[in-house]
Image (cartoon, rainbow, N blue to C red):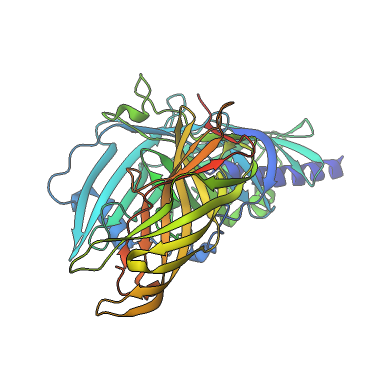
Amino acid sequence: MIAQKVRARVFVAAAVAALTLGAMTVVALAADGSVQPADTGGATVATAAEPGDFYAGIDVVGYTACGDTANWLGNPQPPTPISGYLSGFGNAEKLGNALVVGHPEPALARSVGPEQGNQAGGARVGTTTYTCVLDTLELDYQGRRQFPPATATFVTFGFEPVTATVHLTQVGPDPLKAVLYLNATQEVASGPFHIVATSTVSMRIDQVSVNGVPLDVGDNCRTAAPLSSPDSPVQPEQLVLIGGSELGDPSPHFAHLGFGGSLAGYATIPPFIDCVGKDGENLDKLLTATISGPDNYVRINLGPVCVVGFATNCTPDGGPVRLPYWTVTGGGDYHGTMTSPALTISMRRPPPGASTVTVTCGSASLTGTMPDTTGPLRGNLGTARLEVGDCTGFEESQWTVTQLGTAGIAGNFSEDGLMSGKLADFRIRLDGTNVPVPDGGRTTCSLVIEGTASLTYQNPTPETPAKLSLLPRSADRNILKLPAETNTCAVIQSGLTSQFVGVDFEIPSGATVLQPIAP
């Protein structure tokens, strides 16, 4: 009997480790209790930085300036009410597994009272000007500052089913806070930008059972302190999640508030206290040894945010549209062939006399994969590789265009069978011959274009194949940069470059359908 109870406690501790880590992603109910391999921490094409380096990209000055409207220029407008849905997953570092959470019911966060909501403005620190967006919200589950209970079954050691319920409660006076900042002195208005989100959340577990047999951990088994991110240079005592639009960020790609996106971070789970059942047995040390600890990667997906006054993402009753989930059916490998006249890359000459220059490719194709999925995204919707040929450029120059690495297809928004999204983490190298130089003559040179490119994916119909289109610069902050350190072409300007002129790829094989899950 004693041996059976000990074994049950070990199974429960292992299961609760995964459940609590999944729940702490600022989300809600577990999808189906299934365990998945631990996520690498990034999109399908990138891995996360090590925990100690993950937050290195945070501009503490910019975050501090934008995080308090008292630092802003002029007189900031009062906050506008805001709300959004959240879903995601978390890795159980000690177990090497991850649990999808927040599906089928997402978590809801919304502003409360006149002091919370969405504000936009600017701040100046020395000679640097920042563009700022500040969002402050509260969790709302049946009128309480907490998440919906996260209940799931976890199979420990491959055969023992354990069920537990996790309760996450927002504690203390601080709201959920998201700070978006952009260094407007160095960058144009479209970006790149960064987001830092912070929350103070404690964890409690109950309703634990092993193979259907209840195990009493009491009704107040909880962490001794809130979850934290001690490696973060800002708010290390809170859970800190980051995102952004700059290529190479260890954080996931984030579109903007209108389309939503993903945020990620590393969390430390504190020791457990008051885990005592009716029989008086104290399980604090067991749960602490199995669950508590640092470096647990978490990721959340934010659906389109409803900002009052901008009805695009709001339901008739003023709530957010419920689109933090995606379903991909008929997925797998795909091959798309260019059907528009040519793929054209538009760039700029350096001043003085700046003008548009182009490289045009007569043939192009896209290949990649879009696997079947349902629920909160664990990464991108798919991958993409661009292959092009027959490329000529301005003033009779010739070019070879090669993609470096594999890009991700990131879904942001969808309606009427048309998905708007991003080609994320996108890099292409251009090698030119017979390229003019400013003072006359010809040379060979090369450059790299990197960033994110806007795309749409038109779902197939019985009469027409699917179509993926790369678009010119658009409202969802399409950003392609031309880093100076990669550019040996003096006739082409470093910095921000223009976009694709626009190109369509027809995908006749398969019938992959991308669609957000409706309420």
Residue nearer the viewer, 22 or 484: 484
Residue 251 visible in the shown view: no
The residue lying at 35 percent from left, 19 percent from top is: 316
Q: Residue 71: image x %, image y %?
A: 20, 53
The image shows residue 458 at horizontal and vertical percentages of 49, 35
Q: Is residue 512 above or below residue 318?
A: below
Specify the quadrant of the image occupied by residue 488: bottom left
Q: In this view, does 304 lie to the left or right of 42?
A: left
If the image is split into quadrants, where does the N terminus sit?
top right
Residue 377, given in percent of the width and then of the height, sits at 55, 41
Residue 197 horizontal/vertical position (percent):
40, 48
Q: In which quarter of the image is residue 476?
A: top left
Direction top: furthest residue: 316
* Left or right, 445 with reference to 221: left
Q: Is residue 301 depicted above or below 219 in this figure?
A: below
Q: Name the one closer to the observer, 108 or 308.
A: 308
Q: Which residue is drawn at 68% across and 45% down?
A: 36
